[in-house]
Image (tube, rainbow, N blue to C red):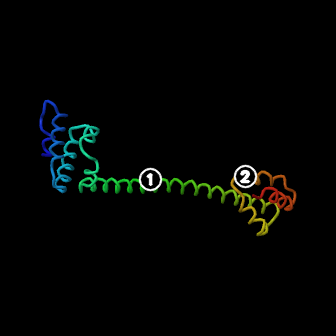
C-alpha cells in the first residue's frame, strides 16, 4: 500500500486520499503505525508536505523508528555544526583578546622604558598601578609623561586616572 503513493494517476491528490483512507482502515495498531509512516515517507517524494499533513496524523510519523532516526541524525548534525561554530567564535575571541593583551603589554613596556629613562627605576607600587591601566590610558600616559617633571607627577596622574 505505501508504494501506491508513487503510482501514476490522473488525479494524484485523489490517489493520496484513497491511500490515506485505506491506511485509516488498518485496525492493528503496530501495522497502522508502520504502514502509515512508510506511506508518509514515500508520499513525501511526490506530494506537498501540507497535503500529507492534512491526510495523515503527524503523531504516527513521529512514533516511527525512521522518523526518530532522522531526528537523531539532525540533532547530531546540529551539535556538530554548533561545536564548529563555537570553535570558530572561540578562535575569533581568542585572537581579539590576544591582540588586546599584546597591545596592553606593549603599551606598559613602552611607558616603563620611558619613565625609567627619564626618572631612573620606577618602584613596584607605581609599576603595579601602571599595569592596571587600559590600553587607552597607557596611550594617554605615554603622552602625559612627556610633561612630567618629577616622579610625583606620575603618582598624581595615576591617582587621577585609576579606574
* Residue 56 image position (x, y, % from top left): 24, 44
Instruction: Confirm or deny contact between disc 1 and disc 2 (CB under 8 A).
Output: no
Q: Residue, x 15% and y 39% (percent of image)?
A: 18
* Residue 124 image position (x, y, % from top left): 76, 69
Q: Residues within 10 Å of mark 1 (few under 14, many from 20)?
A: few
Quarter of the image that includes the C terminus:
bottom right
SS type, badge 2: helix
Q: Residue, x 27% and y 42% (percent of image)?
A: 53
Using the image as rendered, state which of residue 129 and residue 107 is in the foreground.
Answer: 129
The count of marks equals 2
* Residue 103 image position (x, y, % from top left): 64, 55
Label 1 belongs to which residue? 85
Q: Residue, x 79% and y 69% (percent of image)?
A: 123
Q: Give the side of residue 50 with respect to residue 93, left or right.
A: left
Q: How much space separates mark 1 and mark 2, taking CA atoms?
A: 35 Å
Q: Give the side of residue 122 with respect to residue 91, left or right.
A: right
Whether residue 24 is situated above or below residue 121 in the rendered picture:
above
- Quadrant of residue 107 within the rendered picture: bottom right
Given the current orientation, which residue lies at the most extreme top position? 10
Label 2 belongs to which residue? 139
SS type, badge 1: helix
Q: Residues within 10 Å of mark 2 (few under 14, many from 20)?
A: some
Using the image as rendered, state which of residue 74 and residue 140 is in the foreground.
Answer: 74
Q: Which mark is residue 105?
A: none
Q: Give the side of residue 7 with respect to residue 100, left or right.
A: left
Q: Earlier in the sequence, mark 1 or mark 2?
A: 1
Whether residue 24 is situated above or below residue 106 in the rendered picture:
above
* Residue 75 image position (x, y, % from top left): 35, 55
Given the current orientation, which residue lies at the most extreme bottom position? 124
Which label lies toward us, 1 or 2? 1
- Quadrant of residue 104 within the rendered picture: bottom right
Amino acid at each position: 500500500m505505501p508504494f501506491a503513493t508513487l503510482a501514476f494517476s490522473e488525479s494524484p491528490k485523489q490517489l493520496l486520499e484513497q491511500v490515506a483512507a485505506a491506511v485509516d482502515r488498518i485496525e492493528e495498531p503496530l501495522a497502522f503505525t508502520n504502514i502509515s509512516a512508510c506511506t508518509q515517507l514515500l508520499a513525501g517524494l511526490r506530494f506537498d508536505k501540507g497535503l500529507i499533513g492534512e491526510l495523515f496524523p503527524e503523531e504516527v510519523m513521529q512514533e516511527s523508528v525512521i522518523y526518530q532516526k532522522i531526528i537523531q541524525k539532525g540533532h547530531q548534525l546540529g551539535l556538530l555544526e554548533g561545536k564548529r561554530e563555537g570553535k570558530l567564535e572561540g578562535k575569533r575571541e581568542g585572537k581579539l583578546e590576544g591582540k588586546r593583551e599584546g597591545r596592553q603589554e606593549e603599551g606598559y613596556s613602552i611607558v616603563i622604558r620611558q619613565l625609567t629613562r627619564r626618572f631612573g627605576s620606577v618602584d613596584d607600587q607605581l609599576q603595579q598601578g601602571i599595569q592596571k591601566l587600559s590600553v587607552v590610558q597607557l596611550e594617554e600616559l605615554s603622552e602625559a609623561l612627556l610633561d612630567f617633571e618629577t616622579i610625583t607627577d606620575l603618582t598624581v596622574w595615576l591617582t587621577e586616572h585609576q579606574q
